[in-house]
Image (cartoon, rainbow, N blue to C red):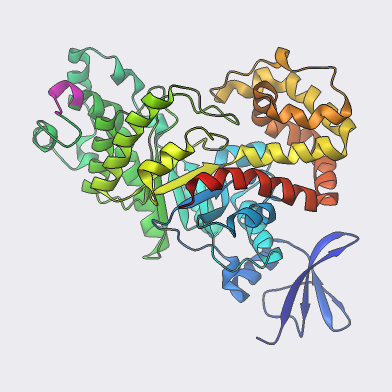
Amino acid sequence: MSETFALIKTEHGKRLQISGGLPAGFHGEQQGDTWICPLDEANAAALRRALPWTAPTTVGLRKSVGCGDRLGLATPGHILAVRESDMFPVFAQQSIREMVRAGRTPQNVMDDATWGVFEMDYQSGFGCDADHLKNTDVIDQCIAAGYIGFTLDPGEFVDNAAHIDTLAGLQAKFAALPWDDLAITPDDLRKRYLGGSFVGEITEEILLRAACKYSTAIAHVRHLSQRIESHLGGKAYDLEVSVDETDTPTSPAEHYFIASELKRLGVKFQGLAPRFIGSFEKGVDYIGDLDVFEEDFAAHARIARELGPYKLSIHSGSDKFSIYPIIYKHTGEYVHLKTAGTSWLEALRVIAMYDTALFREILDFAIERFPTDRASYHISADPAKISDDLMDVDLPNLFENLDARQVLHVTFGSVMTQFRDRLYATLEANDESYKAVLKTHFDKHIAPFQA
């Protein structure tokens, strides 16, 4: 390749500079012997073809960390942390729900990761994660944007009531399960599971609760995974199955049932995200008894080793510092730590450091929006506990406060809509500081997972 590529800063923002001719697929403005190209979709696609290391690759069973980026500016800071570790990074990661709230698309997320990787000359590889996909329409969008990593979320098909149904109610539900989609008969399912197993004895009641709670969701996962298979036509990809957003925890017996059924149905997954016991609230540390968590988590880790191995995926995993040593102790390499909103909070920390007036506006607006925006989150924040008489120099300290963190965390969509231009202008003017605070923050996340 005779052309050379560089990312430069101009008065109009960052641009791609190409010297030595303009390769096919790129477009821009010629300035002497160089071309100055916008960081848009067409040029991002052309760059991934010209420099394959700017495109995602499969992660497989490598120990990994998901680095969600609501703004599209965080990848350089994430790279500063992960390049000093042995965790494989997943940069292009965002759920469709978050994309809608942030006014972004799967293509935006993919392209922003590409530009961040290119800016940092990071050639060690990265993954992507089209997160919490619920239907085939969004799968198609993500495949079109170049995703080869997918998290399927069948939560809408999980029957949470099966946790407390009477035995008669469970038997009626069991008979009505989608047996054709599950490719097994009720009698054969019983034969597969009733009796002893390495997770303990599986009784009729335990099986009925597990089957009624998860079987329709498992059938939906099979349907979605077949869509991915047919669209990718044999191309390698990563697949995770998530049942973390349910009303009740996933017991070890239920985990055993889910993983066994996925394997029986031929779903090729590398990761599973159960709903662990305790509380995984957004933006704050784990809430619960650590000894009880460890006993339960150890059982889940054993199942993942025995039936896989596959990775246990820790959703809402950011800032759960108290349980990271426990998780790594029992999973070793077979773990994926998924983070997202914590990088948004670090962006707001930078705003608080450099534009206190803007930050105060954001905080007031977030408190106003909180009653509405909290609806889809399990959190315990109380806005009334956020101090309203802080000096400017103390504003960054709000990010050590549970209530402030959660209020700012869950209102990100509204805040981005209201303050988008000013947010981006401040962060782009202080991008080195944003990189630095992200590195410091992610170093704390990654360190407990190092051998």
Compared to residue 112, the image places residue 101 above or below, namely above
Viewer-closest of 339 and 157: 339
Compared to residue 37, the image places residue 1 above or below, namely below
Residue drawn 62% across and 37% down?
341
Residue drawn 74% across and 80% down?
22
* Image spot of residue 178 (x, y percent): 24, 34
Q: Is residue 86 magenta?
A: no
Disc tally is: 0
In which quarter of the view is residue 185 placed? top left
Compared to residue 4, the image places residue 70 above or below, namely above
Residue 415 vs residue 51: left or right? Answer: right
Compared to residue 84, the image places residue 353 above or below, namely above
Magenta residues span 201-206
* Image spot of residue 364 (x, y percent): 80, 22
Viewer-closest of 295 and 27: 295
Viewer-closest of 134 and 353: 353
Can the viewer see residue 266 in this picture? yes
Residue drawn 37% across and 24% down?
292
In which quarter of the view is residue 403 placed? top right
Residue drawn 75% across and 72% down?
6
In which quarter of the view is residue 346 placed? top right
Residue 40 vs residue 131: left or right? Answer: right
Residue 335 vs residue 372: left or right? Answer: left
**Quadrant of the drawing holding the N terminus:** bottom right
